[in-house]
Amino acid sequence: MNSIVIDKDTSSADLDRLAQIAQDVVALARAKGASASDVAASVDLGLSVGVRLGEVETVERTRDRGVSVTVYFGQRKGSATTADLDPKSIEQTVEHACAIARYTEADPANGLADPALLARTIPDLDLWHPWDITPEEAIRLGVEIEEAGRRFDARINNTDGAAVQVGAGMTAYANSNGFIGTERGTHHSLSVALIAEDDAGMQRDYAYDTVRRASDFASAESIGRKAAERTVARLGARRLSTRTCPVLFAPEVARGLIGHFLSAVSGGALYRRASFLVDHVGKSVFPSWMQIVERPHIPRGHGSTAFDAEGVATRDSDLIKDGVLARYILGSYSARKLGLQSTGNAGGVQNILVETGADDFAAMLKRMGTGLLVTELMGQGVSLITGDYSRGASGFWVENGAIAFPVEEITIAGNLRDMYSNVVAIGRDVDPRSHVLTGSILLERMTVAGE
């Protein structure tokens, strides 16, 4: 069991071995008296290389293994995990889970997913693309990215380094209802952060790319150049006086706005009555032209999966239809707490697509006219209970549809309920580096606090 090593040639056999481990644990839990159980067995491998100013700073290989088991004695639940795939360690883990379950209180919402909802077929979503790169090659690639940024402008006189990260993982999930499912996937990333300086002071910015398949990366030159352009553009940043104005969220921060919505309609927040969108299914949240859908089966999608963390089949479905909330985001437990059915979202959402308009980024700036372009957000000033939103921000002041100057040390504030209803447009400049896919988002107005 300890010899599992993820490899592009042996991964199918390794998946089968993980599946057998998961099934064996289910049988073991039954033998120890559990009325039901589910198990996830996983292996993850990674390589991470960091360089700074042309020199190697870190080279790290990771190899994580784990078995997570949940057992039920009626409606009493116990969970335990181990990072050791040795049979004796796994048996002790099952015993720990059983001991916990015997002494916990029964909860009517506990239990496995409805067998009728479990995935029957598991399509190939093209998620497995191991990157055959050596540490030496990764170092050279990191140096190339950093050098591309450093030579862009003489004002770039320092860096926070470049990183090359390689990741591959596989998981087998089984439960006592007879479900067994396996998945494997890869995630790779390249990044660099640069520092520029002029008479007004120093500024820092970055660029990155993340993909399932290494051949889909942007070039090292373009990543370094983008980081440099972003960094130099921030030089001479000013503060703004306090005002109310339109705000355009760049795509990489716009997905955070969508993320707050997803959190507010997730089961845990709803059954605790800790969301400003409690009891909002069938009610308008966004403008009537806006659509948000979940698409779990996009080939090579960052959030693609055939089944959720409970084995429930994933499927395409609407979240926002013509501005109206179509459903919540639920696993089995939260669904039972609410008297509803799982939506296949145990463990979170899959690929979320925000339908875009026709305008590219330049057209979105022109549509805003004069206002604030936000490119970075800081702080955690968001309350899902009330919807109150207040975060530190930086970006650019825009006049007559063109960027006028960079801004920093400001705060943008509003309420998510109003912000969502006052969305003016969604750009077609979609950022593909996430499972939440949206273009830039233009809001009619927000309060901007500065000097």
Image (cartoon, rainbow, N blue to C red):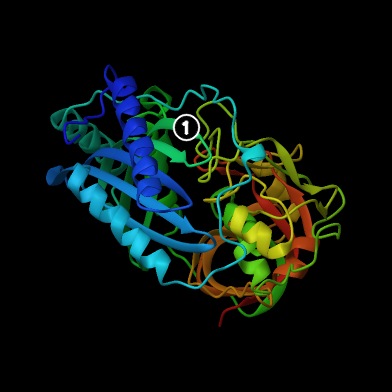
Work out which residue is located at the far top of the displayed protein and give it: 9
The residue sitting at 30% across, 61% down in the picture is 96
Label 1 neighbour load within 10 Å: few <14, some 14-19, many 20+: many
39 or 35: nearer the eye? 35
The quarter of the picture where residue 16 lies is: top left
Image vertical order of residue 351 relative to residue 419, above or below? above
The quarter of the picture where residue 449 lies is: bottom right
Q: In which quarter of the image is the N terminus?
A: top left
Position of residue 198 in the picture relative to residue 3 (left or right): right
Position of residue 205 in the picture relative to residue 314 (left or right): left
193 or 9: nearer the eye? 9
Residue 253 point in image, percent of width and height: 55, 55
Residue 99 point in image, percent of width and height: 34, 65
Give the residue at mark 1.
181
The quarter of the picture where residue 2 lies is: top left
Image vertical order of residue 346 relative to residue 8, above or below? below
Residue 271 point in image, percent of width and height: 67, 69
The residue sitting at 55% across, 75% down in the picture is 381
The answer to whether residue 136 of the structure is visible from this angle is: yes
Amino acid found under the numbered disc labelled 1: Gly
The answer to whether residue 239 of the structure is visible from this angle is: no
The residue sitting at 77% across, 69% down in the picture is 418
